[in-house]
Amino acid sequence: MSKGKKIGLGLIILVIGLSMGIILFVHERTYTAMEEAVVSLDDYRVRQEDDWIVIQPEEEVKANLVLYPGGFVESEAYVPLALSLSEEGIRVILPHMPFHLAILDSDKFDSIYQAIDSDLPWWIGGHSLGGTSALLYASENEKVIEGAVLLASYPSENTDLSQSPLTVLSIDATHDTIINETQYEETQSLLPDDTSYVSIEGGNHSQFGYYGFQDGDGRSEITREEQHQQVVEAILTVLETSPQ
């Protein structure tokens, strides 16, 4: 075998090895949806597309919310929350992200917005890293978005929305030990002055979705259902009072 062919073969083997390593790493890190979330995929209001999941309200649609999943969390883990929101007239779209990392495709909102024909208000949001990624998009697309919903999340240091006209809701939980409290507090200056802050007493980071208990999180003192109910109430309050 010639020297050139040996180098070429070596590069192919290296690329394959790296790819396998990445796949295995992501697989080991991924938080899969709990059985309750998987079962909810069979609900008649849930429609699965190639790149996202649509949860359609049974009756009148009042608004659209594109919700980015947390880092290494399956999108399906947020279907139960989306179903609760759909009962209040909110159409929720859960994007599938590359390697379950929204930061790798923060512009995913674009394709959803173009595919779903709706003149109703559009909101973007996300859990944890998903919320940070959603704000990256929101900061550059204020004309098409009404506001943003953050679940245990905060903006990156280079995402300044302090002068933005967007309506922002930030929800945290008192037993969340995943979120960086220092950064959460320091980056509040990057959000609009009229940002609404809601703190769920006794809730934690993991219970914003249905993917089990996340390593390093605090123990909750309320049920997942109770935490979701408070999230839904907070979102409804902001959506209903937001100028549209």
Image: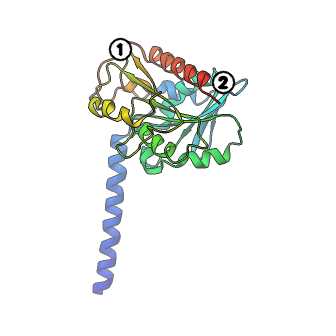
Identify the image quadrant of the N terminus.
Answer: bottom left
Where is residue 61 drawn, in percent x and y?
70, 28
- Amino acid type of the residue tagged 1 in the rendering: Gly
The answer to whether residue 101 shows anywhere in this view is yes
Residue 43 x, y percent position in the rendering: 63, 27
In the image: residue 236, left or right of residue 35 = right
- Tell me if mark 2 has few (under 14), some (14-19) or many (20+) residues whose alpha carbon lies within 10 angstroms of its own: some
Could you tell me how far apart the alpha carbons at marks 1 and 2 are, in whole angstroms? 27 Å
Picture residue at 73% right of the left edge, 25% below the top: 60
**Of all residues shown, which one is farthest toward the bottom?**
2
Describe residue 48's horizontal placement relative to residue 10 as left or right: right
The residue identified by callout 2 is 89
Residue at figure coordinates x 42%, y 47% from the top left:
103
Q: Nearer the viewer, residue 21 or 198?
A: 198
Of 69 and 145, nearer the camera is: 145
Return the x and y of residue 123 as percentages of the image width and height: 57, 35
Where is residue 161 drawn, in percent x and y? 45, 39
Identify the residue shown where x is 46% and y is 28%: 195
Q: Secondary structure at mark 1?
A: loop
Mark 2 residue type? Gly
Instruction: Give the quadrant of residue 217.
Output: top left
Q: Residue at x 55, y 34 (%)?
A: 147
Which residue is label 1 attached to? 202
Looking at the rendered structure, the number of numbered marks drawn on it comes to 2
Q: Earlier in the sequence, mark 1 or mark 2?
A: 2
Quarter of the figure that contains the C terminus: top right
The answer to whether residue 203 is left or right of residue 236 is left
Answer whether residue 45 is visible to the viewer in this image.
Answer: no
**Residue at disc 2, secondary structure:** loop
